[in-house]
Amino acid sequence: MAEATPRIEQQPAGDGGVARLRGDWTAAQFSQPLVVRTLQGALPPVSAAQSWDLREAGQIDHIGAQLIWDHWKRQWPAQLELTTAQRAVLERVAQYTIDPPKRPSQGFNDLYLAFGGALLRAFGQIRGFVRLIGQLTINLGQLIRAPHEAPWRDLSGHLYRMGAKALPITALVGFLIGVVLAYLTSQQLRQFGADAYIVNILGIALVRELGPMLAAILIAGRSGSAITAQIGVMRVNEELDAMRVMGISHSFRLVMPRAIALAIAMPLISAWTTVAGLAGGMLAADLSLGITPLFFLKALPDAVHVHNLMLGSVKSVFFGILIALVGCHFGLRVKPNTQSLGQGTTASVVTSITVVILVDALFAILFSNVGV
């Protein structure tokens, strides 16, 4: 068995050297990964002065010949000794080995066409999203005219899954963000003797910005991806085609219940996250600055105007509708294969978070004087 193990022996001869192959260079020997790694490390570099002798090798099949041919960089060495059978195998491998295609260099015209294609795809996405918004508006009018035809059972189920089941994770994240923000703020306020202003900073930051933003980002990652995956699986299983054949509107039965559910749940989740963040900030302020929870609760209504709470709630409604629409948009565009499903889910989460941040920045600019 040791004699059949493929190996190589190098012997000096003149300025170069002689590389002699021994053992069986066959697929049976290369089935062990350790043998392949050992041979790849032992093969000498190819040079003009290097002489190769394959005559003492036991057997060489096409697998072994391919390994040798690739090591030679698919060129015959200048000095080579081998038998007629070995030459026939190597020539056959050399004849049918295809070099990897070279990637053509992109010129200005190719870059221009690639940019145009990306622009058209982006416009297609925007057009589909605007169409979805218009269809949702029509469905809401249909809901008002005939409320008995609405999918209320689907709406209640989405409220439970997207709202109630998201309360633990949003409370945990909000509490930890409040603790971190309070500790970082207290280190700066202590230097100026302005410990009491931590209530103002935490109140404005959490009620107006961080509470709704954190809740929206968590819901976008949790529920937005679930919406895309659910509708995408329906596409893969051809359930969407079956609904179309039966005359059931995708937007009325799939998009509208999810949009309404998130529009209702997001303000409540945002308020819940804000309360958890204020609780964490209150605890950290008591431990770091000695501000008691009673003082914190008494000073909070004076530090945070009610308009900030209203602004945060209104933003949350928009966040919920946008997250639902983005999730449904990418879910409906999923192709009937698993690869497209994964790509659509990833794009849905990234787009939802980006849209939430952009809309929050827009609200911050438009309502910069409200509640300040």
Image (cartoon, grey):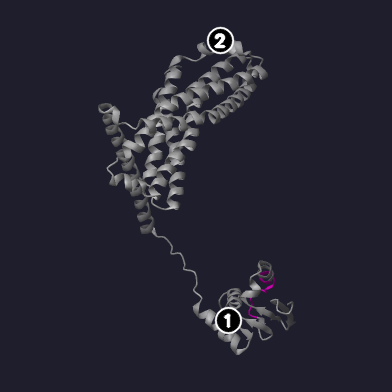
Residue 204 percent coordinates (x, y):
51, 20
Q: Is residue 92 magenta?
A: no
Residue lying at 56% horizontally and 86% vertically, measured from the top left: 88
- Using a 10 Å C-alpha cutoff, classify the residue at mark 1 as few (fewer than 14 neighbours), some (14 to 19) or many (20 or more): few
Q: Earlier in the sequence, mark 2 or mark 1?
A: 1
136 displayed left or right of 7: left
Boundaries of the magenta span:
39-48
Image quarter hosting the N terminus? bottom right
For label 1, the SS is: loop
188 displayed left or right of 355: right
- Using a 10 Å C-alpha cutoff, classify the residue at mark 2 as few (fewer than 14 neighbours), some (14 to 19) or many (20 or more): few
Q: Amino acid at mark 2?
A: Lys
Q: How far is the residue under mark 2 from the one under mark 1?
A: 88 Å
Residue lying at 48% horizontally and 26% vertically, measured from the top left: 269
Q: Is residue 45 magenta?
A: yes
Residue 257 percent coordinates (x, y):
37, 33
Residue position for label 1: 76
For label 2, the SS is: helix
Depth check: give the residue in front, 112 or 97.
Answer: 97
Residue 346 percent coordinates (x, y):
47, 44
Residue lying at 74% horizontally and 81% vertically, measured from the top left: 12
Magenta span main SS: loop
